[in-house]
Amino acid sequence: RGGEPVSCDAAGRTPNALRGEASVLVQGERLILRPAFSALLAAEEELGPLFALVERAAAGGLKLAEMVALFWNCRFNWPDAVTREQLGEAVAGQGLAAATPALKALLGQILSGRA
């Protein structure tokens, strides 16, 4: 499979591609993103229609804040100590190229409807 290398989070879990999961590195810890229905509803409440979000991403118009918001709403079993600000700093600090595989995985799930 292409894309981001498979790695474990602190609890030894790896992202489950069949669930559309991805991961991001925050403060040295690989954390899982899961685009569950409830997570996507929360993201849509905050960001507006998800299809419009996908269109903005495809056109290169997705804002960093929107990416972080999507990631934040899709977090799965993260330590309570991790804040949204820390997530944003991690994404910005690593650069958009490092966040792209996770973003592509989540947007793919939004389009495919298998979340």
Image (cartoon, rainbow, N blue to C red):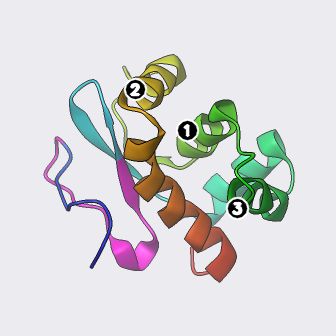
The prevailing secondary structure element of the residues shown in magenta is loop
Magenta region includes residue 33: no
Rendering coords of residue 43 (x, y %): 71, 48
Q: Which callout, 1 or 2, points to the residue nearer the camera? A: 2
Residue drawn where x is 16% and y is 41% of the image: 10
* SS label for mark 3: helix
Instruction: Point out which mark residue 58 bears.
Output: 3
Q: At label 1, which amino acid type do we have?
A: Trp
Magenta region includes residue 17: yes
Which of disc 3 and disc 2 is earlier in sequence?
Answer: 3
* Residue picked out by circle 2: 90
Alpha carbon distance from label 1 to label 3: 20 Å
Rendering coords of residue 115 (x, y %): 57, 73
Rendering coords of residue 6 (x, y %): 20, 62
Cβ–Cβ under 8 Å for marks 1 and 2: no
Furthest residue toward front? 60
Q: State whether residue 35 appears in this view.
A: no
Placement of the N terminus among the 4 image quadrants: bottom left
> Which range of residues does the magenta coloring cover?
10-23
Residue drawn where x is 68% and y is 75% of the image: 111
* SS label for mark 2: helix
Residue 56, image quadrant? bottom right
Q: At label 2, which amino acid type do we have?
A: Ala
Residue 45, image quadrant? top right
* Residue picked out by circle 1: 72
